[in-house]
Image (cartoon, rainbow, N blue to C red):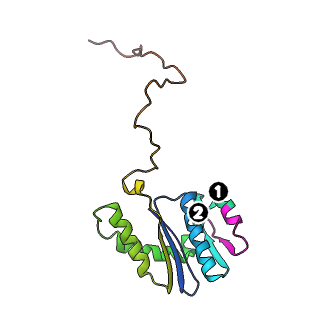
């Protein structure tokens, strides 16, 4: 479970997106929410990013480059979460939400969304982008194929036949 989020410098507004993973697709959901916030307010934004792979991938770099007219980037030094103010907020959120065991993943996601709402701000945009397949317990989106190896599949490299090791002592 990943939360991408930002808040305005004076704390008036916040944009938070809850996703099922930490990849470029989820980061694109977050950028779409920032687009929505930008069209509402019309203000420029400054976004502080760490060097996570979801921020530095080719797809994310293209998406960020498309928003350079109104979105300015500030890159943090590697391994410096103490410089990111949002990390403190998420520490409190994790403490509150993970302090007990939720019945299922849907309840857990709802508690995260409620916790993000309690963090405050006059104008909050909180998006629940957790897909149903993630809530059903899958790590990746189902492809539609049956589980297991396809019938009739052959290895590209033939396997060696099984032989006993010659250097073992003989049975007594």
The single residue placed furthest to the right in the displayed view is 69
Task: Give the residue drawn at x 58%, y 62%.
Answer: 28
Q: Nearer the viewer, residue 153 or 9?
A: 153
x then y, percent, for residue 122: 50, 87
Q: Is residue 76 magenta?
A: yes
x then y, percent, for residue 60: 64, 60
Whether residues under marks 1 and 2 lie with C-beta atoms below 8 angstroms apart, the answer is: yes
x then y, percent, for residue 170: 32, 12
Q: Is residue 97 magenta?
A: no
Which residue in the structure is indicated by mark 1?
59
State the image quarter where residue 73 is shown: bottom right
Instruction: Give left or right: position of 51 versus 131.
Output: right
In this rendering, the answer to whether 57 lies above or below 99 is: above
Q: Residues within 10 Å of mark 2 (few under 14, many from 20)?
A: some
Q: Residues within 10 Å of mark 1 (few under 14, many from 20)?
A: some
**Which disc number belongs to residue 85?**
none
Task: Give the residue drawn at x 57%, y 65%.
Answer: 79
Q: Nearer the viewer, residue 153 or 99?
A: 153
Q: Nearer the viewer, residue 172 or 107?
A: 107
Instruction: Give the mark, 1 or 2, whose residue is nearer the N terminus.
Output: 2
Which residue in the structure is indicated by mark 2?
28
Quadrant of the snapshot with the N terminus: bottom left
x then y, percent, for residue 62: 69, 60
**Which stretch is magenta?**
63-78
C-alpha gap between disc 1 and disc 2: 9 Å
In this rendering, the answer to whether 134 lies above or below 78 is: above
Q: Which structural element holds mark 1?
A: helix
Quadrant of the snapshot with the C terminus: top left
Q: Is residue 80 visible?
A: no
Q: Is residue 36 visible?
A: yes
Q: Which structural element holds mark 2?
A: helix
Q: Nearer the viewer, residue 105 or 172?
A: 105
């Amino acid at each position: 479970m990943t939360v991408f989020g930002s808040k305005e410098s004076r704390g008036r507004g916040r944009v938070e997106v809850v996703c099922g993973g930490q990849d470029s697709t989820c980061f694109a959901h977050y950028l779409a929410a920032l687009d929505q916030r930008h069209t509402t307010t019309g203000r420029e934004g400054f976004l502080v990013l760490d060097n996570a792979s979801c921020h530095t991938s080719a797809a994310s770099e293209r998406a960020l480059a498309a928003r350079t007219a109104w979105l300015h980037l500030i890159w943090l030094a590697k391994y410096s979460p103490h410089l990111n103010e949002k990390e403190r907020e998420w520490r409190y959120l994790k403490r509150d939400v993970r302090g007990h065991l939720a019945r299922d993943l849907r309840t857990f996601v709802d508690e995260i969304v409620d916790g993000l709402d309690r963090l405050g701000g006059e104008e909050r945009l909180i998006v629940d982008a957790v897909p149903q397949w993630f809530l059903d317990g899958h790590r990746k989106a189902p492809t539609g194929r049956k589980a297991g190896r396809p019938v009739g599949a052959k290895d590209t490299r033939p396997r060696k036949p099984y032989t006993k090791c010659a250097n073992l002592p003989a049975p007594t």
